Amino acid sequence: MILVKDAKDIILNSAYNFGVEEVPFLKSVGRILKENILADRDFPPFNRVSMDGICIDFNAFKNGQGDFKVEGIQAAGIEQMTLQNKENCIEVMTGAVLPNNANTVIRYEDVTLKNGIATININKINDCQNVHAKGKDRKVDDVLISENKIISAAEIGVLATVGKSTVKVAKQPKVMIVSTGDELVGVNEIPLKHQIRRSNVFTLVSLLERLKISSDTAHITDDKPILKQKIKGFLKDYDVLLFSGAVSKGKYDFLPEVFEELGIEKLFHKVAQRPGKPFFYGKTNECNIFGFPGNPISTFVNCLAYFYPWYYKSTGLETEEETAILGENVSFKPNLEFFLQVKLKSKFGHLVAFPVKGNGSGDLASLVNADAFIQLPNDKTEFKTGENYPIIRYR
Amino acid sequence: MILVKDAKDIILNSAYNFGVEEVPFLKSVGRILKENILADRDFPPFNRVSMDGICIDFNAFKNGQGDFKVEGIQAAGIEQMTLQNKENCIEVMTGAVLPNNANTVIRYEDVTLKNGIATININKINDCQNVHAKGKDRKVDDVLISENKIISAAEIGVLATVGKSTVKVAKQPKVMIVSTGDELVGVNEIPLKHQIRRSNVFTLVSLLERLKISSDTAHITDDKPILKQKIKGFLKDYDVLLFSGAVSKGKYDFLPEVFEELGIEKLFHKVAQRPGKPFFYGKTNECNIFGFPGNPISTFVNCLAYFYPWYYKSTGLETEEETAILGENVSFKPNLEFFLQVKLKSKFGHLVAFPVKGNGSGDLASLVNADAFIQLPNDKTEFKTGENYPIIRYR
């Protein structure tokens, strides 16, 4: 049995670069960017009018002029005009190019327009006001988005602005999710008294969809030759196999044996944690094998605590640890790291974690009332209100 | 000009119930649940073995018996067996039904099995240990998930468990996103010197996808008759219109006039905030109209600050305010509520917000370096390190 920290290190050391693919930019949300996005021109690309109003040569105003004959209108989307006489003005619209020979914009609110003459109603004007100077935000070839970032709506706007209609992102691993257990029936079936419905595969499918990974699923009965034959095929066809169940001490927990017979290198089996202790992790040259214990909460927490970091490392994403403050005392005697379900509350900028009472690792419904797991280390047994510990959010 | 708080109240008062639809459970992630999910049976549905080992009648052990003849194996997924002789045992697997006449499970680690006899190696055993009693977690007809919750991977597992292969969720509004502005060209085009590419519509599409709303988009030139004709059609066909641009004071900012001519009731135009001040909100009997200012950050923040809460209220979702602690002093003089871009850091359970320097509402790229907006009220001008304020996250 190894420590959570060591298990995580082993898994991170097995991270694997699946390469890069190009996708339409609108389909890239949630994916990990694998190229630097550069400014294709200065931003703004021209001296940009930032208020609706009139533009003038500031010197005219400085010299005491208050009335300006209107030469025309510079709308957004129109080629740059030229102020023919520096004692005149041009009406300008937000987003327009600032006309030649003008440098200062006075907004409509501070101007009276009558009979083709604009009269400025205020005494104080700043040279170059209400003009967003060319290149002020960014210069051509500046890095606007660095690679290895998760793409969100904010990045989508930038990609559109610089004309990146397709974008390079980390390729996703091909994942097969396998459930075992003869007691399991389909979601559409009515279970007999001794049966229950499959649920872990669907939880895993959803947890992977959060990472924009689409996965395949299979159910295999607790029959060793069949397990062996099917898994042999999966090892060839997939980058990652996620198992739920059949990794513990039971007579029909064939997976560890089957893995060994198929030449899967066991990197560890059993981690000093609750829930999720009988977790198996191994690999071949081409495939990573996560054998999660079959209890619903064990599968859930181990996917978050191990598969997620492995995926982030594999795709180059750097993540930051998040911590929360315990809202209640917790006592936990076993010499195991405790992943405790908590409800998070934001209070005055503090993130407070309230333990959610569950009935152990089989009580899937208790996850519904929580938002995250708080990770309580195995070298203590008493955890006090006000102490802070790392959390893993799942919503 | 109205206050942010009042603008938000007006918008929440216009929330609209779009009804309910039924979707396959695996497609329901991110949607708002519109039915209570009940336990279809007790959970566990039978006295469930929770460790691999042997089961016995506790009285035999209590009477001093240490060796138990093995009658057979109760696997998971097999009908309940019966312990024929209460001085014998049955091997049992995690997830199996506890056999009749047995009540206590001793794990393999504490037993020696030899020649069909199981010898218990420990002195202390508790009555009924390692048995997860029928109905201990939940009773039949208990509410496992209450309606009006966002469905996540945790809820997917519960839906599968109780056989909800389809589930009732809030229907999504039909949304049209319209950009205006003759300076805008497509993402695939090379803009002329006075042009820029469309980006706000795509940002809005992505922000709506976060809510699992798929939207349509259109671009209309700054031509009043064309605007009027197109919008007239949209008002019939959509529940929500989101506009970006053409709501300010410019000569070609036709939208407020067009809205009036089309009989749209103006609920407000201009909010005391920066960025995003010239925001227009109105409605007809069938349609809600959000006119966001055309600057990229104004559109972005107003979608988060107004459309999101409107959508949550419309679908019945209750949300909680999140706050963060300022990591730097901020000075902001105008009598406006300030939506300031911040980078969030988790430190010892505190959420600290560090302002991200941008160049005003046109500098879309600055959103890339931030995670959220912190909302600084308009009745103060100096905001000190350590004070906490509400935030709106966008990643």
Image (cartoon, coloured by chain):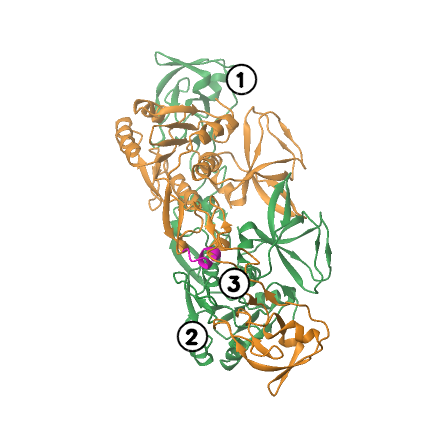
Chain colours: A green, B orange
In the image, B211: left or right of B184? right
Mark number for residue A124?
1
Q: Secondary structure at mark 3?
A: helix
Q: Is residue B294 above or below residue A199?
A: above
Q: Main secondary structure of the magenta part?
A: helix
Residue B130: x and y in percent read 62, 68
Residue B50: x and y in percent read 58, 68
Query: Label 1 lies in what chain?
Result: A
Residue that label 2 marks? A236
Residue that label 3 marks? A314
Residue A395: x and y in percent read 53, 50
In the image, B148: left or right of B262? right
Question: Magenta segment: does it hold B20?
Answer: no
Callouts 3 and 1 in the same chain:
yes
Where does the magenta region start and end? B157-164
Q: Is residue A20 above or below residue B174?
A: below
